[in-house]
Image (spheres, rainbow, N blue to C red):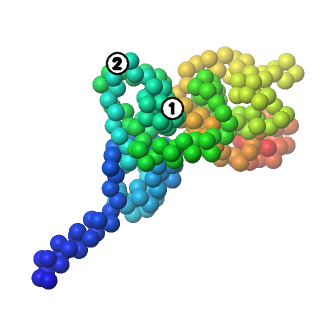
Amino acid sequence: MNKKAKVFFAVLVLSSLVPTFANAATYTVVKGDSLYTLGQLFGTTSGTLMTRNGLKSTVIYPGQKLEVPATVYTVQKGDSLYLIAKKYGITLSALRKANGKWDDMIYVGQKLIIPGSASVTANSAASANNSAISYTQSDLDLLARLITAEANNQPYKAKVAVGAVVINRVKDSRFPNTIRGVIYEKSYGYYQFTPVQNGMINKPASQEALKAAYDALNGVDPTNGALYFFDKTATNKWLWSKPIALRAGDMIYAY
């Protein structure tokens, strides 16, 4: 075999080792993403994503473009996110996450990423296994509004942690067993969360807060079970007496 033939053969072998996606789309990385979570979303592995995108490490950054296994769908008249998700057999949450779409506004001709066919079963299983509690779109919006009001100028980790505290309370028998019940709970005549008391809870949620709420609702908990959070300037001795689980930005999270 001559030199040129050997080079061609080597390139051919190497090319055959790079995984290809039958249906592929370009996904833009957002804050909080990791190759692991994207692998779950798109029904593949972090290793496959690394190889396909020529990555040398698992580090990714917001704004980075990645090729993922997915179909690109063009919105038709009469479509809704719910109907599109149902049509492809994926969860509404997966469709929202894949497109960074946290409201319900879509328009004819809009392009949406549909997680690839190989990911349908994986997404359904991941959703069922990872979801911290069952929730509705209304719950997602309410939790995101609380996160916006409590931690709008805080790091993303702090935002997710606020959501996690609410979820942890829902799962704790000492608190109401619904998101709405926890957020609007009164103790000794006072609401548990200041934004409910002062009306800030009624302001629209930020896009980052919606994503943080989604992560918390699907099992992400930077606090590992905290039930309380407060600002570092708080003077309440009872709160400070609690074991501290996490410090993030200006926020303290405690058990």
Please give the name of the residue rendered at 46% of the width and 57% of the height, measured from the top-left corner: 46
Residue 216 image offset from top left, x and y in percent: 62, 39
Placement of 202 over or under 32, stated as above or below: above
| Front-most of residues 85 and 34 | 85
Q: Quadrant of residue 168?
A: top right
Q: In which quarter of the image is residue 70?
A: top left
* Image-based side of 206 in relation to 53, left or right: right
Q: In which quarter of the image is residue 63?
A: top left
Q: Which of marks 2 and 1 is nearer the N terminus?
A: 2
Q: Which residue lies under the disc numbered 2?
A: 77
Please give the name of the residue rendered at 71% of the width and 34% of the height, measured from the top-left corner: 166
Quarter in which the C terminus is drawn: top right
Q: Are marks 2 and 1 in contact (CB under 8 Å)?
A: no
Residue 208 image offset from top left, x and y in percent: 52, 34
Is residue 216 in view from this perspective?
Answer: no
| Front-most of residues 178 and 2 | 2
Give the CA separation, mark 2 to mark 1. Answer: 19 Å
Q: Residues within 10 Å of mark 1 (few under 14, many from 20)?
A: some
Quarter in which the N terminus is drawn: bottom left
Please give the name of the residue rendered at 40% of the width and 22% of the height, measured from the top-left corner: 79
Amino acid type, callout 2: Lys
Q: Is mark 1 on a helix, strand or loop?
A: helix
Placement of 190 over or under 166, stated as above or below: above
* Image-based side of 162 in relation to 15, left or right: right
Please give the name of the residue rendered at 38% of the width and 48% of the height, measured from the top-left corner: 68
Disc marking residue 92: 1
